Structures are given as structure tokens and as C-alpha cells.
Amino acid sequence: MNSEEKSTAAVQQRAKRKEEAKRVPERKEAKGAVVYIGPAIKDVAVAGGVYTNGLPERLKDEIGRRPALRELVVPVEKLAEAKKELAKPGSALAEIYKRAAGR
């Protein structure tokens, strides 16, 4: 594969991830506000960020690169339940948070 083919393949892969990221959060964003309960991601998301009109493009892109982050976007009405799970060491959500935080 020459450098031009590699470049084209990389561009196509990025476009595909972007499209997937746009579709992925739809189930969490269906109606109403959602909260990002993961660690802060510089220039992408703040911990506890509330989104009422869909997720910002940068966060969608990051979810496209790291799909597990979508689990850290929860509907406001499920926030208390999600925080309880985050507090349980070894829970699925706590493990996703740890990986997102780089621990």
C-alpha cells in the first residue's frame, strides 16, 4: 500500500468513525437532557457536563474513537443510579471510568 492509498484509507476511516459517533449517542439523547459522568477530557468534555440539544461534535468524535465513553453519557433521570454504580468498585461503569481516566 503506497502513501496515497494509506492517506485515503485513513481519511475514509475517520469519516466512518464520525458517522458512527453521530449515530451512537442517539439512544442516550433520545429526548431530554443527558449528563457526561466521565472524567474531564481536555477541549472535549467537562465532568458533569449537561447537554440538552445533543452532544457536541467533539464529544461525538471522541465517542467514535473510544465507544465505551457512550456509557458515561446518561439521561438526567438516571443520573442518581449511574452515580451509585460509579461508586461501586469493580462495577462495569467504574471500570469504564477508570479506563477513560487513564488509570
Image (cartoon, helix red, strand yellow):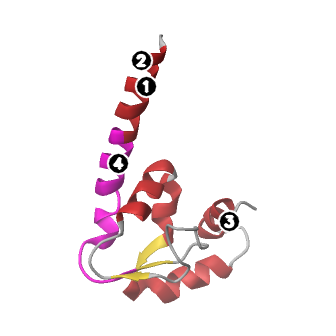
* Chain part drawn in magenta: 15-34
Q: Name the residue under label 1.
A: 7
Whether residues under marks 3 and 2 lie with C-beta atoms below 8 angstroms apart, the answer is no
Q: How far apart are marks 4 and 1 (CA)?
A: 17 Å
Residue type at mark 3 is Ala
Residue type at mark 2 is Glu
Question: What's the residue at 56%, 79% (across, down)?
Answer: 47
Q: Find residue 44 and report its horizontal and vertical position in percent.
A: 49, 67
Q: Residue 101 carries which label?
A: 3
Question: What's the residue at 34%, 39% (across, down)?
Answer: 16
Q: Which mark is residue 58?
A: none
Q: Name the residue under label 4.
A: 18
Residue type at mark 4 is Lys
- First in residue order: circle 4 vs circle 2: 2
Element assignment for label 4: helix
* Magenta span includes 18: yes
Q: Find residue 41 and report its horizontal and vertical position in percent.
A: 57, 68
* Magenta span includes 102: no
Residue type at mark 1 is Ser
Element assignment for label 3: helix
Q: Which of 79 and 9 is in front in this view?
A: 9
Q: Nearer the viewer, mark 1 or mark 3?
A: 1
- First in residue order: circle 3 vs circle 2: 2
Q: Distance between the residues labelled 4 and 2?
A: 21 Å
Quadrant (top left, top right, bottom left, bottom right) of the C terminus = bottom right
Q: Distance between the residues labelled 3 and 2?
A: 35 Å
Q: How crowded is mark 1: few (under 14 residues within 10 Å), some or many (20 or more)?
A: few
